[in-house]
């Protein structure tokens, strides 16, 4: 029996339910817990927010808010059961808890209020509920299982950064490498050199007609490969961006780096500081 089928007001301890959820997620994810199981799981007053919304810890006791609806209590039990599989070394990347939410629920309404969005100029906006929206059923389970195994291994080897986590998640959630026409490749190459080119300038640069430029840009924007100036989504192209910092470069070195075919942008500080 799950939490939705219980009279929650009559319960004093949900530990048995929680243990069943831990056993279930361990079987599905093919991994054993690496965090201690609470000694008690009770319904009481708890007002925590964020990734652990709806519950708090008092020593070894897990307190789930008695104000939650039965379906939300079930979500908390499933979410916290999944978190027992996550090494504590991953706590420095709170977005990893989105995996627990993705396992616990497909209802975005509560999840969206508890997650965090992250913007990085070299990556798409991190919005976990949207990323997982079209990933359901067995495919979602496979993604979560792969993420969990990879993160557990990575955390055992050293510190895991948000970019490591997000790049891995994108590689699993995004479609395979897209096919591009010759005109699309020409436009992408030109935009990589100067993302602020007008349609007329793109036509001159690529030797394509302005009508072809317009059709090509519309296609790339509809596929979200190009989403604005300086916003070519490199992850869709299966590319990574790296920053190379050069101390006191000469004029010749700056020119050489700028001409390098894989240089996307060169920044020259106005002051030495």
Image (spheres, rainbow, N blue to C red):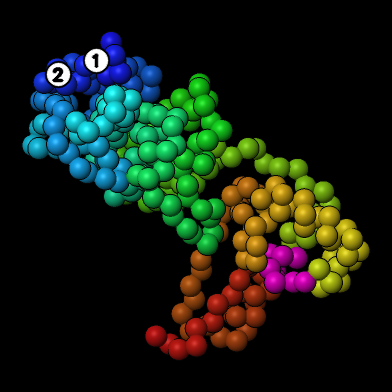
Q: Position of residue 189 (x, y in %)?
A: 74, 61
Q: Is residue 245 visible?
A: yes
Residue 173 horizontal side relative to residue 154, left or right: right
Using the image, determine if residue 252 lies above or below residue 229: below
Magenta stretch, residue numbers: 190-198
Q: In which quadrant will I find the N terminus?
A: top left
Q: Is residue 146 visible?
A: no
Residue at the spot of label 1: 6
Q: Quadrant of residue 35?
A: top left
Q: Quadrant of residue 114?
A: top left
Circle 1 packing at 10 Å, graded few (<14), some (14-19), many (20+), is: few
Residue under the image location 27 percent in, 40 percent down: 53
Q: In which quadrant will I find the C terminus?
A: bottom left
Residue under the image location 88 percent in, 65 percent down: 210
Q: Position of residue 133 (x, y in %)?
A: 52, 35
Q: Position of residue 130 (x, y in %)?
A: 51, 42
Q: Are marks 2 and 1 in contact (CB under 8 Å)?
A: yes
Which numbered tag is attached to residue 11? 2
Indicate the secondary structure of the residue bearing disc 1: loop
Q: CA distance from mark 2 to mark 1?
A: 8 Å
């Amino acid at each position: 029996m799950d939490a939705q089928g219980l009279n929650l007001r009559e319960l004093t301890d949900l530990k048995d339910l929680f243990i069943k959820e831990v056993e279930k997620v361990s079987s599905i994810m093919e991994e054993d817990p690496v965090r201690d199981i609470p000694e008690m799981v009770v319904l009481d007053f708890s007002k925590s927010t964020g990734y652990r919304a709806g519950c708090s810890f008092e020593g070894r006791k897990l307190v789930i808010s008695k104000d939650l609806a039965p379906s939300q209590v079930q979500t908390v039990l499933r979410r916290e059961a999944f978190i027992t599989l996550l090494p504590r070394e991953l706590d420095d990347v709170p977005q990893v808890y989105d995996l627990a939410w993705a396992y616990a629920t497909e209802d975005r309404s509560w999840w969206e209020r508890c997650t965090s969005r992250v913007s990085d100029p070299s990556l798409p906006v991190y919005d976990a509920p949207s990323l997982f929206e079209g990933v359901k059923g067995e495919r979602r389970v496979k993604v979560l299982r792969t993420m969990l195994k990879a993160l557990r291994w990575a955390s055992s080897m050293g510190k895991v950064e948000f970019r490591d986590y997000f790049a891995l998640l994108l590689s699993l959630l995004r479609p395979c490498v897209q096919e591009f026409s010759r005109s699309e490749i020409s436009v992408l190459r030109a935009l990589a050199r100067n993302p602020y080119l007008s349609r007329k300038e793109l036509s001159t640069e690529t030797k394509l007609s302005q009508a072809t430029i317009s059709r090509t840009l519309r296609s790339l924007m509809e596929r979200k490969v190009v989403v604005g100036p300086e916003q070519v989504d490199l992850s869709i192209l299966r590319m990574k961006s790296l920053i190379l910092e050069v101390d006191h470069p000469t004029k010749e070195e700056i020119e050489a780096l700028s001409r390098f075919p894989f240089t996307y942008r060169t920044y020259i500080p106005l002051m030495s500081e």
